[in-house]
Amino acid sequence: MNKRVLTVIISIIAILTISVSMMMLFASMKEEQPRVEKEEMKKYIKVESIKYSTLSSSVEAHGRLESRQYIDLSAEVQGKILSGKISLKKGQSFKKGDLLMKIYSEEFILALQSKKSRFLNSIANLLPDLKIDYPNIYEEWSDFFVAIKMDKPLPEIPETKTKQEKIFLASRNILSDYFSIKSDEIRLQKYSIYAPFNGSYTDVFAETGAIASPGIRLATIIRTDELELEVPLEIENAKWVRVGQEVEVIAANHKLPWKGKVVRKANYVDPTTQSVSIFIKIVNNKNLLLKGQYLKARFTGIEMENVMEIQRSYVNNNDEVFTIEDNKLKKRKINVHKINEKTLLFSGLEEGLKIVAEALVNPIEGTEYEIIN
């Protein structure tokens, strides 16, 4: 090996040896720093002490307003449709007792008066025989004869007191003629159709001047002064509602609520919504509410004993909450009595127990927490 190369290698080794020795010397001279233990982070949590009391609650739900009465007007007699006091048009309003429509009845009236005339003639021929054979009832039948008016309904027929009187009257067809006329008088009333309530037309199927036939639909009317709100409630909330209960009904465009009353409660569950229908009667004298309108119903006055109210966000899996016992997190089951929009009422845990009053993310039982007072 070349002497010069050997000298270079030996020099490099010597320099490295000296450098390592010096580093070890300096390292031994440095004071050893004391080891610092890593301090564990404390976790804090909000709690509430369980305390039961009697609480007032309410149930709120929305529903659609409907009329309490729908009627399909149909003709029971035949004739030409004449205009009444109210226009026969969809959307037209009317009041109870207004003449909605009239069917031409002059021919029928003349036929009825003809019947009455023949009946009067029969009574006139009857009176002389009654005066001789049945003088005790003559005055009654004479007064009956005088009371008959051609343009008014027949008065009440005198009562037959004996078998002989009945046979005598029946043999003269007096009774059959009387009841035939009374039947026609009832039929005459069907030529005029009057409004049975305050309402309006929702559909009209015939026009003035058309010919009506028995059984033909003429129009559909609804009642507007009494409305009904159908509200679907969840099964858990429906159990608190009873028939006769007063309800506050609120419309979006009105500040003051209406008063309503529960008139019906379905005893079945709608299979599509899993809800129970509650029907609320509302008096609408000023016609401020309209059929088809959506309203909110508030069922108040629900008293519940020995319960506590907490936020729904504190509850997991519908009936599980967390408590702090010996500063450690523990899962507990509760009895849920009523669920509100943001809160729920429950029982089932001992009073004085600390319940977690905040929503936890991925909670683990046994985790230690410091309670925030």
Image: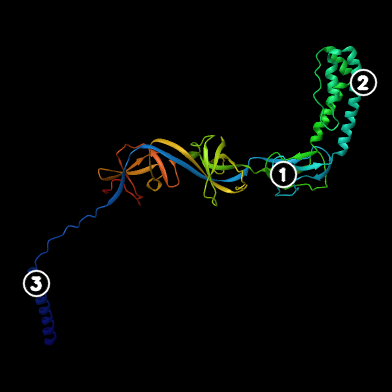
Residue 29 appearing in the image: yes
**Residue name at image x 17 percent, y 57 percent:** 37
Where's residue 158, x and y in %?
Answer: 81, 20
Q: Secondary structure at mark 1?
A: strand
**Residue 37 to residue 290: above or below:** below
Locate the N terminus and report the quarter of the image it occupies.
bottom left
Tell me where residue 265 sits by quadrant: top right
Left/right of residue 162 with respect to residue 316 in the rendered view: right
Residue ID for mark 2: 125
Three-letter amino acid code of the residue under disc 1 = Thr
**Residue name at image x 85 percent, y 29 percent:** 149
Q: CA distance from mark 3 to mark 1?
A: 109 Å
Between label 3 and label 1, give the one nearer the viewer. Answer: 1
Q: How many marks?
A: 3
**Residue name at image x 85 percent, y 14 percent:** 165
Where's residue 262, x and y in %?
Answer: 55, 37
Q: Secondary structure at mark 3?
A: helix
Residues tagged 2 and 1 counted as in contact (Cβ below 8 A)? no
- Dot placed on the residue nearer the N-terminal end, 3 or 2: 3
Three-letter amino acid code of the residue under disc 2 = Asn
Residue ID for mark 1: 220
Left/right of residue 78 with respect to residue 272 in the rendered view: right
**Along the viewing direction, whichever of 335 and 225 lies nearer the viewer:** 225
Tell me where residue 258 sits by quadrant: top right
Three-letter amino acid code of the residue under disc 3 = Phe
Q: Secondary structure at mark 2?
A: helix
Where's residue 173, x and y in %?
Answer: 88, 21
Q: CA distance from mark 3 to mark 2?
A: 156 Å
Residue ID for mark 3: 26
